[in-house]
Image (spheres, grey):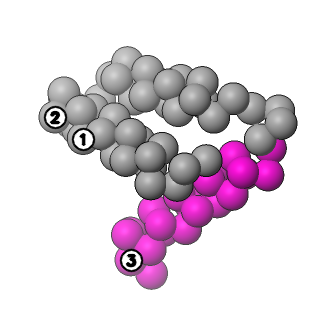
Amino acid sequence: MSQQAQIDALEHLVLTLIKKNRTALSTAELFDDAKTSVMSEKNASGNEYKTEARSYLEHLETTWKI
């Protein structure tokens, strides 16, 4: 199984969880917390990785219209 297929599967799992728990979660807060978490993570990839990850979260937030 490709790494991209695994990432896609996890993305769908997380977004399905968000949709099912809408009453318990503020999706805006959830995405804001995820973006903050990505940006505060310490990893070897540096700021470029963090910026790309944050951008992808923003894309998901608008694309899935949760």
Residue range of the region highlighted in magenta in the rendering: 1-21
Identify the residue shown where x is 63% and y is 34%. Answer: 27
Label 1 close to label 3 by CB (< 8 Å): no
Residues 45 and 9: in front is 9
Identify whether 6 is placed above or below 34: below
Identify whether 20 is placed above or below 27: below
- Label 3 or label 2, whichever lies nearer to me, is 2
Image location (x, y in percent) of residue 24 = 82, 33
Nearer-N-terminus badge (1/3): 3
Question: In the figure, residue 45 lies in which quadrant?
Answer: top left
Image location (x, y in percent) of residue 59 = 37, 47
Label 2 close to label 1 by CB (< 8 Å): yes
Question: Is 44 contained in the magenta span?
Answer: no
Instruction: Name the residue tied to disc 1.
Output: 52
- For mark 2, give the secondary structure: helix
Question: Is 10 contained in the magenta span?
Answer: yes
Instruction: Name the residue tied to disc 3.
Output: 2
- Crowd tier of the residue under label 1, counting other residues whose Cα lies within 10 Å: few below 14, some 14–19, many 20 or above: few
Label 3 close to label 2 by CB (< 8 Å): no
Question: In the figure, residue 55 lies in which quadrant?
Answer: top left
Identify the residue shown where x is 77% and y is 41%. Answer: 22
Under mark 1, the amino acid is Glu
* Label disc, if present, on residue 48 of the rendered structure: 2
